[in-house]
Amino acid sequence: MRKPFIAGNWKMYKTVAQALELVAGLKQTLGDVLTMELAVCPPATALAAVSGALAGSNIGVGAQNMYWKDEGAFTGESSPVMVKELAQYVILGHSERRQFFGETDETVNLKLKAALAHGITPIVCIGESLEQNKAGETVSFVGGQMRGAFAGIPAEDAAKVVLAYEPIWAIGTGLTATPEDANRIIKEAIRDVLTAFYDTATAEAIRVQYGGSVKPDNMADFIVMPEIDGALVGGASLKVDSFTAIVKNALAALK
Ligand code: 13P
């Protein structure tokens, strides 16, 4: 059984003070949730404070990016060694990083290997653009992102990866894939590719989140889908009430 996993990607929001206020609230509302894995991914500047505030709690901490080298002259970057001090997870290959900061399947692959080597759980984001979706290229494109990300990674490491299927056109737009479409794409572009790359057991072990305009009122529809194991939540993770409602609605739907 794959343990459901909901994570909040705060993107470039929250000062340290705002971050601490948010996690203090989440500890109150979600501190007793044990049947679902939970994490928040603050900006790098708030990572240390949030990590301290959540130490010993049931809510994990993730970084939003990292470089693949352990140290060196790489101005502005954070290394896996540094991330590991503050976080258990790292988001890799988010579409915003691919779009605005030159992330490619090759750099995602290097970062993925570095995260696994350092015992950080990677949350690897994949997903198609609106044009690709309309052209019927979703499965081939997402499948290609998958093959690029997992190149050279052995099965025992691959099983530790979390994937987030985030159609780019659904991010921050209020639009979502239908739960049925998301479920089908995860099956055809993610699990079938993993089965071909590795084996059924590995493909079935890997958790796949849906991301893209997840809100309290649509979470249940996604989480009940057999291939969907949770969510990567952007905007609705920035408030105690909405992130709490997303988690509670998912828990209720799984009962
Ligand atoms: P929204 O939930 O704001 O659409 O963002 C999704 C996302 O990009 C999470 O990584």
Image (cartoon, rainbow, N blue to C red):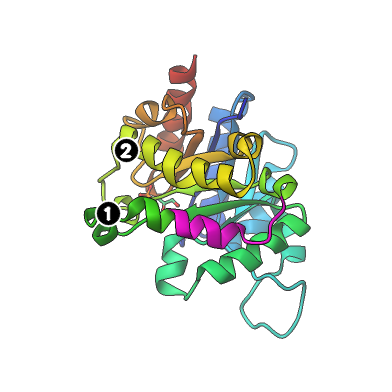
Q: Which residues are magenta?
A: 143-154
Q: Secondary structure at mark 1?
A: helix
The residue furthest left is 134
Give the label on residue 181, or none. 2
Which of the marked residues, 2 or 1, is nearer the chain's N terminus?
A: 1
Expressed as whole percent of the image width and height from the top left, the position of residue 238 reads 44, 47
At label 2, counting other C-alpha atoms closer than 10 Å, the crowd grade (few under 14, some 14-19, many 20 or more) is few
Image x and y of residue 83, in percent: 70, 61
For the N terminus, give its image quadrant.
top right
| Observer-nearest of 52 and 117 | 117
Residue 229: percent from the left, percent from the top?
51, 33
Q: Element at badge 2?
A: helix
The prevailing secondary structure element of the residues shown in magenta is helix
Q: Which mark is residue 17?
A: none
**Is 147 in the magenta?**
yes
Q: Which residue of the protein is positioned furthest toward the top in this rendering?
A: 255
Mark 1: amino acid: Asn
Tell me the kind of residue under disc 2. Answer: Asp
Q: Answer whether residue 64 is visible to the viewer in this image.
A: no
Residue at point 47% right, 74% down?
Answer: 101
> On the rendered structure, is 215 left or right of 31?
left
**Is 18 displayed left or right of 54 in the figure?**
left
Q: Is residue 135 above or below residue 244?
A: below
Front-most of residues 204 and 125: 204
Mark 1 packing: few (<14 Cα in 10 Å), some, or many (20+)? some
**Which label number is shown at residue 133?**
1
Residue found at x 57% / y 70%: 106
